[in-house]
Image: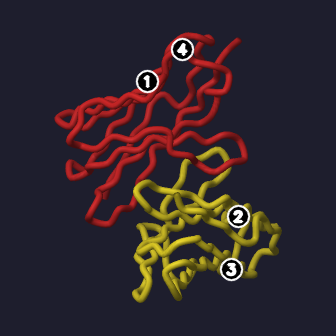
Chain colours: A red, B yellow
Amino acid sequence: GENVEQHPSTLSVQEGDSAVIKCTYSDSASNYFPWYKQELGKRPQLIIDIRSNVGEKKDQRIAVTLNKTAKHFSLHITETQPEDSAVYFCAASIVSRDDKIIFGKGTRLHILP
Amino acid sequence: SAVISQKPSRDICQRGTSLTIQCQVDSQVTMMFWYRQQPGQSLTLIATANQGSEATYESGFVIDKFPISRPNLTFSTLTVSNMSPEDSSIYLCSVEQGEQYFGPGTRLTVT
């Protein structure tokens, strides 16, 4: 079955700097890669996603890149702000097969003042 | 976007008992998913529930322990049976509607 590896498990960056979180997936049939942000005590919320026919997607300060050959995708957050502090999960899914989403183990991001 | 509610929001249960968690969606969806999130951990998929058929369970999860019902396209239940302290977790239901939406979760503590 699908397996998603995520690194690092914890990341501390100075406010204003960039943060990068990296993930790899095992099933080459995966074609949908969402990223979720989970604040303490709250449900996961989708922040950006990318499909396998695209190599990069950007939404304001957040971008995701995908390398299908290497089965690798990354989340980039620029100009980090205190409200970016949260746990971030990458995930992978096979759309039109079963749609189930398999999550990475998460990255706890701390934005330092 | 899908609006999902869950009941109960939290519960404290004694070992050996069972708890049924309800998930209600404000629109019809084909598939509903049940996840478990243990403290400080990621989300682990328990099963996928399609209306009109038996749920499909992930490795490590069995129907006797986590029976699921899916009586219609807007509702599902997950029962945690014969609970032990290891079942203490947050249980979330989820639906796919263009993107994956999650319910608020049910925080279960087993004593």
Q: Which type of secondary structure does the marked residue at label 3 adopt? A: strand
Q: Same chain for the residues at labels 2 and 3, yes or no? A: yes
Residue at screen point 25% across, 38% down: A71
Q: Same chain for the residues at labels 4 and 1, yes or no? A: yes
Which sits in the foreground, A100 or A59?
A: A59
| C-beta proximity under 8 Å, tags 2 and 1 | no
Quadrant in which residue B23 is drawn: bottom right
- Label 4 marks a residue whose chain is A
Q: Distance between the residues labelled 1 and 3?
A: 40 Å
Q: How far apart are marks 4 and 2 (CA)?
A: 35 Å
Q: Mark 1 points at which residue?
A: A76
Q: Mark 3 points at which residue?
A: B20
Q: Name the residue under label 2.
A: B106
Instruction: Locate residue B106, reporting x and y percent.
Output: 70, 64
Q: Which type of secondary structure does the marked residue at label 2 adopt? A: strand
Residue at screen point 28% across, 44% down: A51
Q: Same chain for the residues at labels 4 and 3, yes or no? A: no
- Mark 2 residue type: Thr
| C-beta proximity under 8 Å, tags 4 and 3 | no
Q: How far apart are marks 4 and 3 (CA)?
A: 44 Å
